[in-house]
Amino acid sequence: MKKSFLSFLLLCVAGFSSANEQANEYELAVKAFHSGEENEAFIHLKNALTANPEHLSSKLLLAKVYFNANNLGSAEKQLEEALNLGADINLVLPMLGNVLLLQGKTSEVLAFEERASEFSRQTQFEWKLLRGRIYLLNSQADLARKEFEQATKLIPNKPSAMNTLATLYLQQKEYVLAEQWVKRSLSIAENNERTWLLKGNLEANQGQMSAALESYQKAYSLDPEDPKVLRSLVMTHLKANQLEEAKRYLKKVQEQTPNDPTAILISATLLSDEDNAELAEQALTELSQKVSAAEGEELTDANTLLFIQGASEFILKNDEKAQQYLSQYLRQKPSDLGATRMLAKVYLRSGEPYKLQLLLQENFDYIIRDLGLSVQLVYLYIDAGRLRAAQQAFEQIRAYHSDSNYVVILEAELARASGEAERALSLLQTLPYSEADAPIKWLQLKGELALQVNNYAQAKLAVEELIGRNIKTSPTQNLIAAYYIKTQQFDLALRYLDDVLASSSSNLGARFNKAVVLKSQGKPEQALVLLKQILTTQNDHVASYLLAARIYLQQQDYPQAIEQLDKVLLYQQDNRVARELKLDTYMQTQQWSLALVEVEKLNREYILNEQYLSSYAEVLIRLERYDDAAYPIGLLDSIWKEQPENLITLAQMQIQAKQLSAAKASLFKSHELDPNTMTTLVLLAKVELAQQQIEDAEKTVVKLQQLFGDSSELYALKGDILLRKSLPLDAQKQYSQAVALNHFNREAVVRLYQLSKQGVAVKAFHQQLEALLEDSTKTAWHRRLLADSYLQDKQLSQAQTHYEALRTIPELENEPGILNNLAYIYSKTDLDKAYSTIAIAVEQGSKNAAILDTIGWIEIQRGKFDQGLVFLREAYTMNSSDAAIRYHLAFALDKLGRKAEARREVQEALELDQQFSEYEDAKALLDSLS
């Protein structure tokens, strides 16, 4: 026992020696940064991150250093990494949003909308400013103004909001309003450099150049390094023909940013004024990329000679020259179908289907006379995923060639591409063919469709006929192999595929089908190897990308899965399966903004699809865009209005979208259609309570009892009603009865726990839960609530007993929350035991604000102020709005003799929350520091 404890201590010493180095370097960086020595701060921060590459405080401060140096890419990298490591969004977003906007990455900024529920009031303010600036970039001034005005209401005396609003008015030439906001801003912060810069811009726009120069000079005196101020001074002196002054400030701009386009342009202007035209031209040239394309020589031959030359080169298989002559010829004679067929073959030979598609598309009015060419265009559209274009072309083909059986086959192909395999199979069966006399194309397509809809009997008929005819084409071989795979005859499929590959090792269909078999046999890595080989030789093989994506999804490798699906959409932009898989992946990984992009595309392409509409509604709800969610929910309402089960689903969506009246109507309709479903009335009562319609809820509960008798759900609802009537003791009795009837009614147990936190029937709650704790596994969550309740009630001994009992369950032994609470309890009597307990959570990588605060505060109590400060700094980076963490930071800084920083932190703690448990201690600390 002593040996293992000693080894633990040695590990801690080794770990914390680097932690101490990182802490020292970070604290030195903080001092240097606040003293204006940013280069020195940079060195210390790099040293800190060498000691610990995941030190959040260092990453955030380093991002500030990069930002101040205009190194936006590096600042973005540090902030993104900090966020991924768990930094508080409220610390990261204000700077990251600005960094992204300055790089024009507006969509990346807007993606943070899905985290709006985590924003503090200050971050909500910053978010309004960011959104407003994006609207300005998109020339949506009215929407921008609304955002800025909302920002000024959130935090009325914030100069940044006033300046932003003034800038908007300035851009719209509403100078009086702009001036009012500038004056208000200066009245709050008279030494705000950005406000003086804005004042100068306002005056310059009105032609008041002397006043503008004074304002710019004031801004320059406040911040002589701001490039915007320097540029404004250069331009103002230029307009006043004060060239020497302009050059002086220009030199400062160029020292900061040598490649600044504006500086280059101004420099060129100055050089030009000095009759140095050659140097001016060189400077101006640097502002744009040199893009030039040599124009081909125009051939002057007659059309007939062009056709002869093109045809000759086609015959000789000089495809490059054939393309040149035939395409020039067809520009003059697009109606020549013979030349079109030749050029089409050249494009196919050269592996350029996109060029072929353009050729047939541009000449469609002529090629529609030729069924082969026009059908070829439809197939090209299908292969490219352009189903709408394929459908439009098909409609014209059907009108022109209405008597051809091949048009029906083409319609079936189009139906299959649109995901309507059943309809496609039905279309084929309308043709007057049997397996014995059918053309191969019909047999092939029928077999593929039958397999797709799992109609193995029909597939077998087509496959047997193809085998009987000894058809050896690649599509037919693929179909036969696919039939064996679908019917779970993997060994036969493999033998068949290996025979095919023995005679043709590059047979694409056989290699792909073998990958399918390997996946089905639980050999995903072997399947991926085969798929990668296929894609090396044919990088547009969509089926291989899709199969690889499915394998990666099974392995939960979501980034790789998305990469494969994006490859599919690169070649087939409307591929429905790929879009569905992308949507499912984004929803599964809770990337709601990205999910929205995909679900909107699916709903535009496939109107009134119930699955897509449901997903659309869910995504909008997750993004808290409730008004927008009304659209897909309304469509589902019209589709499901006579389906009682779906109406319950609809009501749940409407509740999530805050459409309570609509939810109530859906539940009434569902109950009317099916009065024997208990869930409908339970949900209806909850909706009525949410609408404060207590009498209606009581009537619904009466009906529930009449129809279904006593139930745990019934008593829980009675408790909810009594709670709404402010009768917590009576409500507690009903919840207790609900739990008595069903120990696992989680909602009722949680309600009892919440009431106990308010001091209602605490002892009764403890007694009832104690009686339930028979099976330690099944009732683990009961025990956790009980332990938390004892802790809340300051019955530390009982809480300790239950937390320790929870740790005997293997999966909960090192659960961070349990360790955290136990460490707090132990800290009252044994700081070393408390430390060793919370250290387990830290050592296993559980880094959250609560755990870091606990270990930091324990270290402070043990007198290890430097080490405690390290943990508390990290806790702050993860939750900057926690008053207790700010107080603990202040306490540590005070102990280290850093009184000014301690005062700043404790003031912030007291302003953040006047209810936290250590409020009086924090007040006492502030008094001592004052």
Image (cartoon, grey):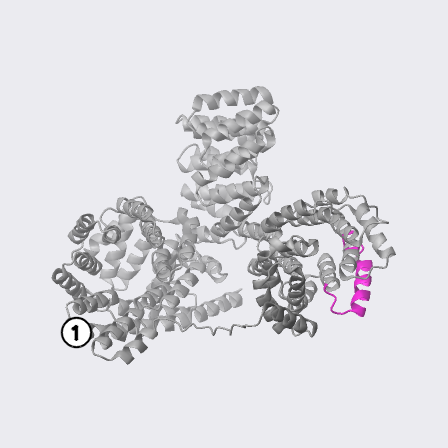
Q: Is residue 348 left or right of residue 451?
A: left
- Position of the C terminus, as image quadrant, is bottom left
Q: Quadrant of residue 315?
A: bottom right
Whether 849 is drawn above or below 433: the answer is below
Relative image position of residue 543 (x, y in whole percent): 66, 58
Relative image position of residue 360 (x, y in whole percent): 61, 58
Under circle 1, the secondary element is: helix
Q: Is residue 296 left or right of residue 909?
A: right
Q: Residues within 10 Å of mark 1 (few under 14, many from 20)?
A: some
Q: Quadrant of residue 854?
A: bottom left
Residue 745 appearing in the image = yes
Residue beneath the point at 78% across and 67% down: 501
Q: Amino acid at mark 1?
A: Leu
The residue that mark 1 highlights is 243
- Residue 499: say if magenta: yes
Relative image position of residue 265 (x, y in whole percent): 28, 71
Which is more toward the observer, 814 or 192? 192
Residue beneath the point at 39% across and 36% down: 758
Helix, strand or loop: magenta stretch: helix
Tell me where the magenta segment starts and ends, as one range: 484-508
Relative image position of residue 774 (x, y in whole percent): 59, 40
- Residue 321: say if magenta: no
